[in-house]
Image (cartoon, helix red, strand yellow):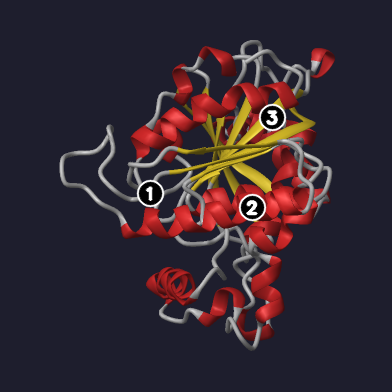
Amino acid sequence: MSANVPTALTLRARVLLVLSVLLATLAPTAPALAAEKAGASRPGAEVVAVTQVADRQVDLSVRSTALGGRTVKVRLLTPDGWNPQDRSHRQHWPTLWLLHGCCGDYTSWTARTDVAQTDALRDVLVVMPEAGWNGWYSDWWNHGQGGDPAWETFHTVELRRLLERDWGAGTNRVVAGLSMGGQGALMYAARHPGMFKATAAYSGSVHPLLNDESINRIMGFFAGQNNDPLRVWGDPVAQRRIWESHDPYHLAKRLRSIPVYLSCGDGTTGPLDTPGSTSALEADFNRQNHALAAELRRVGAKHVTTNFYGPGTHGWAYWERELHASLPMLLGALGIDG
C-alpha cells in the first residue's frame, strides 16, 4: 500500500478530530446545555442562551410553549454566592419577582432604578421577567380561542418551574410591580394562593372596572399594541366574569391573608416632578387604589399598608422610592431583615 494513501484507521481518526473541533466550537455554555437537556424531556419553557450583562445581572433567553414557541428574556439580579451550576452545594434562594409596567420590558427596573445597588437585596434572587410591551400579565382571551400570548401561564407555571429546577430560585416568594405590573403583582398573588407571601403595587392599575373612564383607559392600552382591544379580556360587558377575574378589587378576598402594600400619587405636580407636570393616568389609578384599599378593609384584610402620598405623577422617581419603602414588608415576609 502506498504511503500516500491513508489507511481506514487514519481517515477515521481525522474525521473524529474534525467532529470534535466542530462540537467544541458549537457547544453552548454549561447553563444552556443543562437547560437544553432538561427541556428536551419537559415541555414548557427552556433556556436557550445565558448572558452575563453586569455584576450580579444575568439574562436568560427563554423559549416558551405558552408564548407560541417565542423566545423572551428574563433578567436575574443574583444574590451573593449564587452558583446554580454547583450541583453539590446548590442553594435555593428567597425570591422577589419584580414586574415591569406597560411600554417597558425586563430591563426596566435595572435601567431606571437603583435596584442593582440595593444592599438589602444581596441575599435575594430578584426575577424580572419580560411581560410584553402591553401584555397585562394575562393569558389572552383571543375571542375564546386562548393561546399566544399566555403571559400568566408563562410566568406562574413555566418560568417558575424552570427557575426553581435549574437556577436557584426557592419556593419562598414575594412579588411587586408598577402600573401594569402592579396589577400583575396583586393578580398573581390572588389568583395563585400560596405562591407569594406578600405583594406590593406602585401606581397600580388595581381596579380597571371602577368606572367608564377606567375601562376606556385600559381598553385604549389594549388597542395600542394589537388594534383589537377585545383580544385581551374580551368585552367588559359580555365577558364581565373574565374582567372581574383579572381585577384586583374583585379578588380582594383572596388577598386577605398576606401583607399587601399599595402606593400612588394623585396626579398633580409632586416633589419629584418637573414643574407643571400632571398625570390623568395617575389620578385614575389613585381613585382605583383608594377603592381597593377600602375593599380590602371591608373583607377583613389585616396586613394592608398604604402610602397615598398626594402630589405625584406616574414616574420612576416615585416607584424607586416606593420599592425601598416597601422592602421591609416584602423582605420580612421572606424572613429577611430589610
- What's the residue at 65%, 58% (across, down)? 248
Secondary structure type for disc 1 = loop
Asked if the residue at tag 3 contacts the one at tag 2, i.e. Cβ–Cβ closer than 8 Å, the answer is no
Residue nearest the viewer, comparing 318 with 157: 318
The alpha-carbon separation of the residues under discs 1 and 2 comes to 17 Å
| Picture residue at 54% right of the left edge, 52% below the top | 289
Which residue, given by chain and number where applicable, does mark 1 sit on?
266
How would you rate the neighbour count of disc 3 (Cα within 10 Å): few for under 14, some for 14-19, many for 20 or more? many
Q: Pinpoint residue 242: horizontal percent, then vertical percent.
A: 69, 75
Q: Work out whether mark 1 precedes mark 2 in sequence or the reverse, and give the earlier one.
A: 1
What's the residue type where badge 2 is placed? Ala
Earlier sequence position, callout 3 versus callout 1: 3
Assign the C terminus to one quadrant of the image: top right
Q: Is residue 149 left or right of residue 268?
A: right
* Secondary structure of residue under mark 3: strand
**Percent coordinates x, y for residue 99 in the rendering:** 55, 44
Q: Is residue 229 left or right of residue 139?
A: left
From where the camera sits, is residue 320 visible? Answer: yes
Q: Which label was assigned to residue 95?
A: 3
